[in-house]
């Protein structure tokens, strides 16, 4: 495991706005519990771990709407307060143009990918 995915997502439990590394599904489950209804963060986290990527899960209050939480996570990334540069930043549920534009700038700095869904990408384009 050497490619890091920094993932913003909701969760049943755990600290808000703290980057938490997860190395396996059991650790993910113990730290964050079950996914809230309509949330996609835990689903993307499971996929990340199954593809044998390193994961940092950044719990937000509500996917796509907790702008201060997203800003805090982006601040951590921009100031390189994460132990390793992310290969990808994942933001399920986020379609806001300002947040995605700021994330794109960070992706450019790290040469990272931005992972989002078709629905969120459509929201971004039509915002």
Image: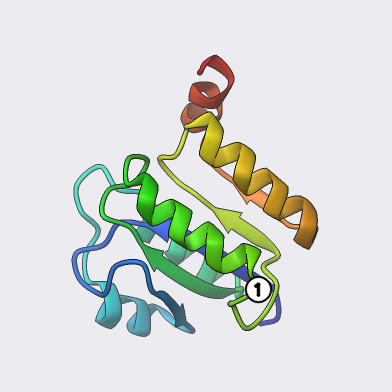
**On screen, residue 13 above or below 36:** below
What residue is drawn where x is 48% and y is 62%?
73
Residue 84 placement (x, y as % from top left): 67, 79
Residue 113 placement (x, y as % from top left): 70, 52
Answer left or right for 83 relative to 98. Answer: right
Answer left or right for 112 relative to 57. Answer: right
Q: Which residue is mark 1?
A: 80
Crowding at dot 1, Cα within 10 Å, few <14 / some 14-19 / many 20+, comes out as few
Residue 46 placement (x, y as % from top left): 43, 65
What residue is drawn where x is 61% and y is 73%?
53
SS for dot 1:
loop
**Closest to the observer: 59 or 23?**
59
What residue is drawn where x is 65% and y is 73%?
80
The N terminus appears in which quarter of the rendering?
A: bottom right
**On screen, residue 27 above or below 4:** below
- Residue 43 visible? The answer is no
- Residue 126 visible? The answer is yes
Answer left or right for 26 relative to 76. Answer: left
Residue 38 placement (x, y as % from top left): 25, 42
What residue is drawn where x is 54% and y is 62%?
75
């Amino acid at each position: 495991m050497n490619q890091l995915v920094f993932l913003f997502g909701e969760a049943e439990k755990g600290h808000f706005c703290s980057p938490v590394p997860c190395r396996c599904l059991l650790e993910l489950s113990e730290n964050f519990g079950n996914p809230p209804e309509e949330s996609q963060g835990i689903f993307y986290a499971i996929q990340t771990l199954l593809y044998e990527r390193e994961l940092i899960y950044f719990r937000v209050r509500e996917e796509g709407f907790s702008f201060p939480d997203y800003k805090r996570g982006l601040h951590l990334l921009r100031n390189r307060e994460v132990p390793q540069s992310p290969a990808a930043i994942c933001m399920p549920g986020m379609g806001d143009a300002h947040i995605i534009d700021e994330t794109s700038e960070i992706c450019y700095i790290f040469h990272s990918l931005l992972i989002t869904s078709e629905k969120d990408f459509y929201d971004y384009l039509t915002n």
